[in-house]
């Protein structure tokens, strides 16, 4: 028998299948209002839709009830709207900033390098975001370690949507970006082009030209923005 999974159910199971904050009701078989999976118990959408709830038509469109997974995702927006990644039965809430990473919330690179070691068919799902306020999780997609992808939401870098990319290529791009960061270029400048910070770029024209040539190989590729977000100055690099 095929067991159907959805992005929300994969995250929910990785969290230990916790109960939503609203009581579950036994109902006639229907589908989840948010993810569409078949259910016989759930939480009525009226319990979830507070006065501040928005995008009803996008997030509650299939029925009147949310499955336990989606109801739990709706229950705790502070946790479930932030950076999150699940691979198989392992769940992380990674940090973008290396200085703020902890044992409980490791840095994104630490997590991604662990995920890259898992079997290629391991299901994955998650969100890499610089803005945890929007309710993005109903838009997440399932991927695998081999065919990797994340929902990437970074308005400052003109990105909001699912991005499919290869983990090994991401790590290669991280080396290039991290080298630029160690040279003093901010991430925004790396995104726009090193010459946009002319004073810093002109301090060593040859090095800047070399770095720009490397970056131009990546800027049009899907790995670039995710690599930019997870890079930091302390990353070891092959560049000298």
Image (spheres, helix red, strand yellow):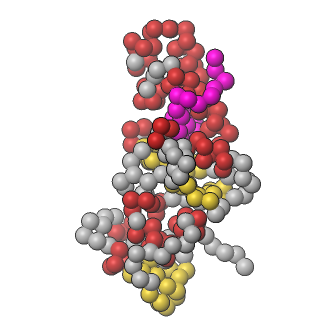
Q: Residue 214: image x %, image y %? A: 59, 22
Please identify the quarter of the rendering in which residue 195 is found: top left
Q: In this view, does 64 lie to the left or right of 239?
A: left
Q: Does the magenta-highlighted stretch encompass residue 71?
A: no
- From where the camera sits, is residue 9 visible? no
Q: Residue 199: image x %, image y %? A: 39, 12
- Name the dominant secondary structure of the magenta segment: loop
Vertical order, 38 against 215 (above or below):
below
| Range of residues picked out in magenta | 216-240
Residue at 47%, 37% in the rendered image: 99
* Quadrant (top left, top right, bottom left, bottom right) of the C terminus: top right
* View extreme (left): residue: 51
Residue at 49%, 85% in the rendered image: 41
Camera-side residue of 1 and 105: 105
Q: Is residue 121 left or right of residue 59?
A: right
Residue at 44%, 9% in the rendered image: 202
* Quadrant (top left, top right, bottom left, bottom right) of the N terminus: bottom right
Q: Residue 124: image x %, image y %? A: 62, 57
Q: Does the magenta-highlighted stretch encompass residue 222?
A: yes
């Amino acid at each position: 028998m095929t067991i159907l999974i959805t992005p929300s159910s994969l995250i929910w199971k990785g969290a230990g299948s916790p109960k939503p904050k609203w009581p579950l009701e036994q109902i006639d078989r229907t589908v989840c209002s948010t993810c569409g999976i078949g259910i016989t118990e759930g939480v009525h959408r009226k319990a979830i839709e507070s006065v501040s709830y928005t995008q009803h038509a996008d997030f509650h469109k299939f029925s009147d009830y949310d499955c336990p997974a989606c109801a739990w995702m709706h229950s705790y927006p502070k946790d479930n709207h932030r950076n999150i990644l699940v691979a198989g039965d392992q769940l992380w809430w990674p940090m973008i900033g290396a200085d703020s990473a902890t044992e409980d919330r490791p840095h994104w690179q630490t997590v991604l390098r662990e995920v890259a070691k898992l079997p290629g068919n391991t299901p994955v799902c998650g969100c890499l975001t610089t803005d945890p306020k929007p309710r993005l999780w109903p838009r997440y997609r399932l991927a695998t370690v081999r065919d990797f992808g994340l929902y990437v939401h970074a308005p400052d870098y003109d990105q909001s949507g699912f991005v499919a990319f290869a983990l090994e290529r991401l790590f290669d791009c991280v080396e290039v970006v991290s080298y630029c960061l160690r040279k003093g270029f901010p991430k925004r400048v790396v995104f726009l082009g090193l010459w946009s910070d002319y004073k810093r770029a002109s301090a060593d024209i040859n090095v800047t030209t070399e770095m720009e040539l490397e970056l131009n190989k990546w800027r049009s590729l899907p790995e670039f923005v995710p690599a930019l977000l997870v890079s930091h100055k302390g990353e070891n690099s092959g560049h000298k």
